[in-house]
Image (cartoon, grey):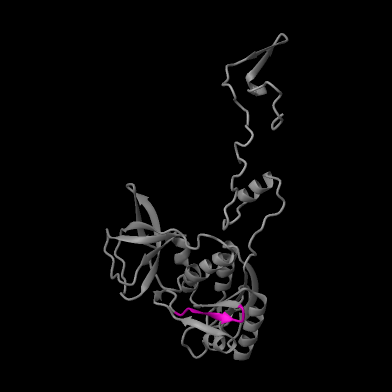
């Protein structure tokens, strides 16, 4: 029987499939001594650290812990993230849309991204451009969550109220970063909750999440590694780049003749969400860099 203890004095197991029975006798083929025997401690030896502190528990870690007879282990609580979109022009998918309105894509991409990195989402829907309503919703969000994430309303338009209201109900730590896309990013606190005000453009929203929110959620969840790996690749096409800011282009990374090569997905507008679908990496061009010529080395972060 698979998994049964070995009889005293036995050191090898013959599978039934490799023996032949002839006239009441058994014929066996040659087999190596010790075959089909699992030794005590060959998986985990006494004193071994099974799972390092700060490790995200995948199904295999959970199974390994269970195999040791442990029914409970100490873990970090999943960060609670309140999520809401802002703007009179934003409507729920599946509802009628009037001229000038757009369907809310950001809340769905952000929800998936939050859950993918271990957060528990509190979806607060869409808030119109009404100061009192936005103020009340932000207070509600901060009371119920560790982190508050909004999309839209952090630029300089007349109806971009998020930054102003944040200053009323909490504290602004910084606003705007030297990156493209994703420049109009706001960060602060509302009570004990961290606040991230992400841009309204879909690609800018995703990029700001990946670069700022995701590492923060990893930190709150107790992970050791906060940032994803970055590699070098050779550009196979020219890439325009303005000095003085960090730019992130959506790229297609592939191996050619034994080396990594990368090209962009095409148009790089911050509203072209299909570029995130077509791509498999970010091309990272730092502040000091100008235009990139074919054959030059660039940094890439696969996603």
Furthest residue toward top:
23
Of all residues, the one furthest to the front in this rendering is 47
- Magenta segment boundaries in residue numbering: 184-192
**Would you place residue 138 above or below residue 208 in this image?**
below
Judge whether 59 appears above or below 91 on screen: above
- Of residues 133 and 231, which is closer to you in this image? 231
Q: From the top left corner, tell me how far across and down residue 220 is, in percent.
A: 58, 67
Q: Residue 163 in the image: x percent, y percent?
A: 52, 85
In percent of the image, x 58 and y 85: which residue is there?
A: 170
The residue under the point 65% across, 86% down is 136
Q: Quadrant of residue 1?
A: top right
Is residue 118 covered in magenta? no
With respect to residue 136, does 119 lie above or below? Answer: above
Residue in the foreground of this view, choosing between 86 and 172: 172
Q: Is residue 108 left or right of residue 71?
A: left
- Image x and y of residue 114, in percent: 58, 67
In reply to whether residue 191 is colored magenta, the answer given is yes
Residue at image x 56%, y 85%?
166
Please give the count of numbered marks on the rendered protein.
0
Residue 105 can be seen in this image: no
Seen at 55% across and 83% down, the residue is 89
Percent coordinates x, y for residue 270 in the rendering: 44, 73
Tell which of 4 and 99 is nearer to you: 4
Residue 207 visible, this orientation = yes
Q: Quadrant of residue 18?
A: top right
- In front here: 156 or 168? 168
């Amino acid at each position: 029987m698979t998994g049964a203890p070995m009889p005293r004095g036995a050191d090898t197991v013959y599978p039934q499939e490799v023996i032949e029975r002839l006239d009441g006798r058994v014929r066996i083929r040659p087999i190596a001594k010790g075959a089909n025997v699992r030794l005590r401690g060959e998986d985990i030896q006494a004193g071994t650290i099974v799972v390092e502190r700060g490790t995200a528990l995948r199904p295999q870690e959970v199974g390994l812990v269970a195999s040791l007879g442990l029914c409970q282990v100490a873990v970090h609580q999943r960060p609670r993230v309140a999520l809401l979109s802002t703007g009179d022009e934003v409507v729920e998918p599946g509802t009628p849309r009037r001229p000038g309105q757009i369907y809310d894509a950001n809340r769905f991409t952000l929800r998936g991204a939050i859950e993918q990195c271990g957060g528990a989402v509190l979806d607060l829907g869409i808030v119109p451009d009404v100061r009192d309503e936005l103020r009340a919703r932000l207070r509600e969000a901060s009371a119920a969550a560790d982190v508050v994430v909004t999309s839209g309303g952090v630029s300089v338009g007349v109806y971009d109220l998020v930054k102003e209201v944040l200053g009323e109900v909490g504290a602004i730590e910084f606003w705007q970063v030297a990156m493209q896309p994703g420049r109009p990013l706001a960060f602060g606190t509302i009570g004990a909750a961290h606040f991230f005000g992400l841009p309204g453009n879909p690609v800018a929203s995703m990029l700001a999440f990946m670069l700022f929110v995701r590492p923060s959620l990893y930190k709150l969840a107790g992970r050791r590694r906060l940032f994803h790996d970055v590699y070098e690749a050779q550009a196979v096409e020219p890439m325009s780049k303005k000095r003085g800011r960090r730019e992130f282009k959506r790229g297609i990374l592939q191996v050619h003749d034994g080396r990594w090569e990368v090209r962009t997905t095409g148009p790089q507008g911050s509203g072209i969400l299909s570029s995130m679908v077509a791509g498999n990496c970010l091309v990272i061009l730092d502040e000091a860099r100008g235009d990139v010529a074919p054959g030059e080395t660039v940094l890439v972060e696969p996603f």
